[in-house]
């Protein structure tokens, strides 16, 4: 009951403002999204417009006015960002962007909050400092970096890198185009590797166990905390590494 009363008091003092805008950007431009504090969700639009829906929240209207949503055409990209006129403002922005079909996404950056991207094309760089990253059905090669949170990469065309300091990682790997790393300092890794991928594979943990299950991996080294092997013609190196957690590799497709 006490928590409910406190929540009601916080809600009563919180001020909220909604921003909505639609654009018809040049489809040859790639989209970049930049947010500082709040949730970011990026998905596919149901028309030819780029739709931006943002909810700003603060403990006073004065602080809300110090944060604006900015969208502009740049030389090679279309940028959507939350702009803070002062540091240390206690303002959050939940940002939703719907991308028109045919427009590719280049990057999504969030300093503090969860980041979700689904059903869009583009070779994507996704970064947040404190929050989960969820990438689903991205038609391109993806990179995901977070300092504190889980990472999920599902049904994306290819994987370049996943890096995490504190949190679990799930990836299904359809394709790699170079040496690829999936790393976390504190968390487990679950990976599915498509049967068409050729790579020299290494699973390495400092505190935990590693296992390759139902794969065509030609095992060269098999220890409790380290496993090395080759699939196909080992065209590239694939490293799955954690300092504290288990690692499991399985195969799909074929």
Image (spheres, rainbow, N blue to C red):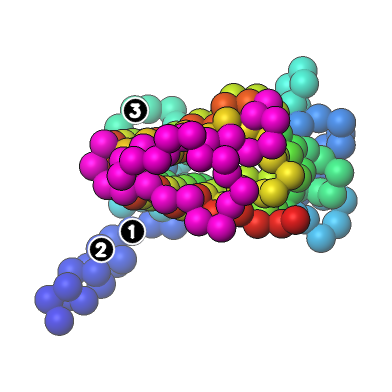
Q: Are marks 2 and 1 in contact (CB under 8 Å)?
A: yes
- The stretch of residues the image draws in magenta is 206-235
Farthest bottom residue?
1
Q: Residue at x 43, y 28 (%)?
A: 85
- Structural distance between the alpha carbons of marks 2 and 3: 22 Å
In the picture, the quarter occupied by the N terminus is: bottom left
Q: Are marks 1 and 3 in contact (CB under 8 Å)?
A: no
Q: Are marks 2 and 3 in contact (CB under 8 Å)?
A: no
Whether residue 229 appears in this view of the structure is yes
Residue 234 picture location, percent across and down: 65, 29
Give the secondary structure at mark 1: loop
Q: Residue at x 81, y 60 (%)?
A: 46
The residue where tag 3 is placed is 87
The residue where tag 1 is placed is 14
Q: Earlier in the sequence, mark 2 or mark 3?
A: 2
Q: Residue at x 44, y 57 (%)?
A: 16
């Amino acid at each position: 009951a006490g928590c409910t009363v406190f929540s009601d008091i916080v809600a009563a003092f919180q001020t909220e403002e909604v921003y909505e805008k639609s654009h018809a950007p040049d489809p040859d431009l790639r989209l970049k999204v930049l947010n500082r504090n709040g949730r970011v969700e990026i998905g596919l639009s149901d028309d030819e417009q780029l739709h931006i829906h943002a909810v700003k929240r603060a403990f006073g209207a004065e602080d809300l006015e110090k944060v604006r949503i900015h969208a502009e055409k740049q030389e090679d990209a279309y940028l959507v960002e939350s702009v803070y006129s002062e540091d240390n403002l206690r303002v959050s922005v939940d940002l939703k962007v719907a991308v028109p079909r045919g427009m590719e996404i280049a990057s999504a950056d969030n300093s503090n909050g969860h980041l979700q991207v689904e059903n869009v094309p583009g070779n994507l760089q996704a970064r947040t400092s404190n929050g989960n990253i969820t990438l689903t059905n991205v038609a391109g090669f993806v990179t995901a970096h977070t300092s504190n949170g889980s990472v999920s990469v599902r049904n994306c065309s290819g994987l370049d890198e996943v890096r995490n300091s504190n949190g679990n990682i799930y990836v299904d790997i359809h394709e790699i185009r170079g040496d690829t790393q999936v790393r976390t300092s504190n968390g487990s890794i679950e990976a599915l590797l498509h049967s068409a991928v050729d790579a020299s594979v290494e699973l390495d943990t400092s505190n935990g166990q590693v296992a390759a299950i139902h794969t065509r991996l030609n095992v060269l080294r098999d220890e409790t905390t380290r496993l090395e092997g080759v699939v196909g013609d080992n065209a590239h190196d694939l490293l799955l590494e954690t300092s504290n957690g288990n690692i499991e590799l399985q195969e799909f497709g074929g």
